[in-house]
Image (cartoon, grey):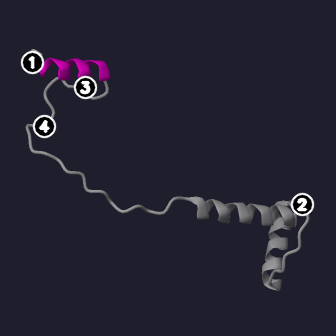
Amino acid sequence: MRTTINLADPLLSEAKKLAAERGSTFTAVVEEALREMLTRHRQPKARARVRLTTFGGRGLQPGVDLDDSAALADLMEGSRGPV
């Protein structure tokens, strides 16, 4: 798509110089700069820290592997006692 933009002379000169150094076009330099700015703008802002409530205890029980969901489910079901 073709459009017209107004740039300050020093900015235009610098962008044209960069394009020449890269063996690229002025349009490619402007597109890249605009993409970078838009990407930074889309990045999520830093979120406020969340404080999680924890409860005292004896910590993780021996033999518990949090990466093994099946064994963890078996352990939790076994700790319920008879139903």
Categorize mark 1 by other alpha carbons within 10 Å: few (<14), some (14-19), many (20+).
few
Rounded to the nearest whole Å, what is the CA distance between mark 2 and mark 4?
Answer: 62 Å
Q: Amino acid at mark 1?
A: Gly
Q: Nearer the viewer, mark 2 or mark 3?
A: 2
Q: Amino acid at mark 2?
A: Met
Is 75 included in the stretch rendered in magenta? yes
Q: Which residue is painted at 20% across and 25% down in the image?
A: 64
Q: Residue 44's spot in the image, x, y percent?
A: 51, 59
Q: Amino acid at mark 4?
A: Gly
Tell me the residue that label 3 is attached to.
65
Q: Is residue 57 above or below residue 66?
A: below
Tell me the residue that label 1 is attached to.
81
Q: Which residue is painted at 78% across and 62% down in the image?
A: 31
Tell me the residue that label 2 is attached to.
1
Categorize mark 2 by other alpha carbons within 10 Å: few (<14), some (14-19), many (20+).
few
Q: Which badge, 3 or 4, comes first in the chain's sequence?
A: 4
Categorize mark 4 by other alpha carbons within 10 Å: few (<14), some (14-19), many (20+).
few
Q: Amino acid at mark 3?
A: Asp
Q: Which residue is painted at 44% across and 62% down in the image?
A: 46
- The span picked out in magenta is 69-80
Q: Which badge, 2 or 4, comes first in the chain's sequence?
A: 2
Rounded to the nearest whole Å, what is the CA distance between mark 1 and mark 2?
Answer: 70 Å
